[in-house]
Amino acid sequence: GLTAQRGPRLKEAIEGFLKDKRRTGRRESTLTEYRRTLEQFCQFASELGIVRLDQLTPTHMESYETELREKGIAMKREKKTRGRPAKKNKSTSVHEKIKLVKSLAKWAVGMRKLRENPISGYQLPADGEAENYCYTPAEVQGICQHAGPFFGDVFRFLALTGLRQGELMWLTKEDLDVTHRLVRVRSKNFPEAELRWDPKGDDRNVPLSAPALVIAQTMQTASKSRWLFESPPAPGVVDDRLRASRLWAQLKKAKKAANVTQGTLHSFRHFFVSTMANANVSPFKVMKIVGHSSLDIILTYYHVSEDELLDAVDGVDFAAMLGAASGEANEEAKNGK
């Protein structure tokens, strides 16, 4: 049984986990992939000073997710290995890698190597298919209505600005410029709190529509801390900074209540880009607003429905250019016209 408060060392837990998976019939090729993924996580954790499984927190998992998505993790060269350079991970890979780490922690609890799962509060990110989903206007309205006043406004603000979830969570009250109707997405460094954050890409100013400005001003007035979107108090909430795991949990509840079966927090960004594109806003302007450096990336966010495509075709007077179709001409001839 478990007799000590301290959990097992990460490397020891990984070896035990892999040994157990081999015993239960996992293929060697699968175990090799498991080992590669877990050793990558172990290296990431060691760079944060984490050597035992019980030292992990949901915040560490959020940082790991961000690292995988935005730049990847380079594997250091060992005596018998070549090492691997850092490489951004696709959403599906991020999902699977974090799922494996969560399985490791769950296994340790089941084997009584840990009293409780230290990362149980961390919500597993969606896979790539859900990541690319674009909400409809009705779905956005339904989610916001069922999310409650605060989180409803958070989700509405994401839909109105196209901000990434991390960009919103790290906004401070000083980032809001009411005079120029914008928020500044920029690097943050608070040495006294040991907090540092850098945006994906360059710093940028994000313009605010009238309803987005109202939300931002309301949040600024209500916040009693440095954050523009101050996390409401709740059981288990340790500070006033919004966390991705809490946003995911609230979104999941709101989606279920609104009967929305697909989509993630990132789907609000897809909604914003598609809405701007369908309003004939220049893609170059959209790039500036959302912080993309390539039109190719913008195209992956541009979603259009079949009804919108049909409206586009109906908007062109082909009959005036080419004359009546043969079927229409024959019908006119039968009628003696």
Image (spheres, rainbow, N blue to C red):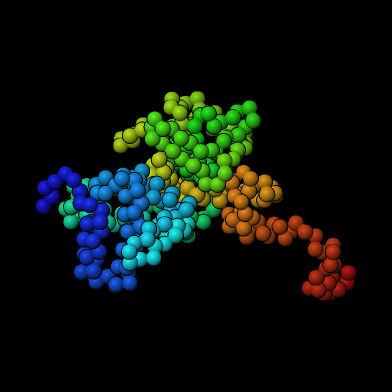
Name the residue: 38% across, 58% down: 76
Which image quadrant: the C terminus?
A: bottom right
Answer with the quarter of the image where residue 33 lies. bottom left
275 and 89: which is toward the camera: 89
Q: How many marks?
A: 0
- Which of 305 and 15 lies nearest the eye of the viewer? 15
The residue furthest front is 79
Relative to the observer, which residue lies in front, 302 or 31?
A: 31
Residue sitting at 24 percent across and 71 percent down?
25
Residue 11 percent across, percent down from the top left = 25, 56
Residue 140 appears in view: no
| 49 is higher (above) or lower (below) than 193 | below
Q: Nearer the viewer, residue 280 or 325?
A: 280
**Residue at the image position 48 percent from the left and 36 percent from the top:** 188
Horizontal arrangement in the rendering, residue 71 relative to residue 192 (left or right): right
- Measured as percent of width and height from the top left, residue 330 is found at 82, 74
Residue beneath the point at 16% across and 53% down: 112
Q: Is residue 37 above or below residue 119?
A: below
- Determine whether, in the image, residue 68 is placed left or right of residue 45: right
Residue 159 position, x and y percent, is 55, 43
In the image, taking residue 305 as reference, residue 220 lies left or right, namely left
Question: Can residue 45 be spotted in the picture?
Answer: yes
Using residue 201 as the reference point, say whether residue 197 is left or right of it: left
